Image: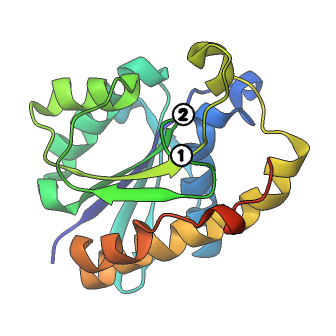
């Protein structure tokens, strides 16, 4: 079975806390809260780390303290030090190319321009790792501005349910593996199910 590593991507610091780019942080922090795990600074990983039992699995949760475009530094340090198998790593990340309220769970795909995933791919020297992409949608404004904006009031109201679903998919990934979890996560919402954001 071995150890598992679940990484939330985002930017450190209070200024970025409630931005769309930090939804990976939000999901993993909520996961820690649900299972009573506490984060502490771990300098050797350049990250905040929580460890404990989730659904019978020994899991490390990681929030890199580097900025998004250097996320791979912390992931590589943790993977090497803890000797974690690639198949036991899950990255939780925002994705502007996926509709708000939708998810995609895959274990082998390109970074699609996401700087956090690009950094992880470079440092691990592979793109064969699981990633749960949480859709943040995309408005017509410049992407760099959009992802660093805070969630709208309407989006915030839906965020709790989105995070709850993400935690369910993470649990399925641990218990049943990526194929079964992906079958549940990778569902496109019908237009009438999508509310205006």
Which label sits on residue 10?
A: 2
Q: Quadrant of residue 170?
A: bottom left
Q: Please, what secondary structure does the residue beneath circle 2 have?
A: loop
Kindly identify which numbered label has been placed on residue 24: 1
The quadrant in which residue 2 appears is bottom left
Crowd rating for badge 2 (residues with CA inside 10 Å; few <14, some 14–19, many 20+): many
Residue appearing at x 85%, y 58% in the figure = 157
Q: Quadrant of residue 171?
A: bottom left
For mark 1, does the 10 Å Cα neighbourhood hold few (<14), some (14 to 19), or many (20 or more) residues?
Answer: many
Q: How is the image coloured?
A: rainbow
Left or right: 162 as drawn, with respect to 188: right
Please state if 166 lies on the left or on the right of 170 as rendered: right
Task: Please tell me which residue lies in front, 121 or 45.
Answer: 121
Kindly identify which numbered label has been placed on residue 137.
none
**Residue in the picture at 40% in, 65% down:** 186
Vertical placement of residue 121 versus 101, above or below: above
Determine whether label 1 and label 2 are within 8 Å by CB. Answer: yes
């Amino acid at each position: 079975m071995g150890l598992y590593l679940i990484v939330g991507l985002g930017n450190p610091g209070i200024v970025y806390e409630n931005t769309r780019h930090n939804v990976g942080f939000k999901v993993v922090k909520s996961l820690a809260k649900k299972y009573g795990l506490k984060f502490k600074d771990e300098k050797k990983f350049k990250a905040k780390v929580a460890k404990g039992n989730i659904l019978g699995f020994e899991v490390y949760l990681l929030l890199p303290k580097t900025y998004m475009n250097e996320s791979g530094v912390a992931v590589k340090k943790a993977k090497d030090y803890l000797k974690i198998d690639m198949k036991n790593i899950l990255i939780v990340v925002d994705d502007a190319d996926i509709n708000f309220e939708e998810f995609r769970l895959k274990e082998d795909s390109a970074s699609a321009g996401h700087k956090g995933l690009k950094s992880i791919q470079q440092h691990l020297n592979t793109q064969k790792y699981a990633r749960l992409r949480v859709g943040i949608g995309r408005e017509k404004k410049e992407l760099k501005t959009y992802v660093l904006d805070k969630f709208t009031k309407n989006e915030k109201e839906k965020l709790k349910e989105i995070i709850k679903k993400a935690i369910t998919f993470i649990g399925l990934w641990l218990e049943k593996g990526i194929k079964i979890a992906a079958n549940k996560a990778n569902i496109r919402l019908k237009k009438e199910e999508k509310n205006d954001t």
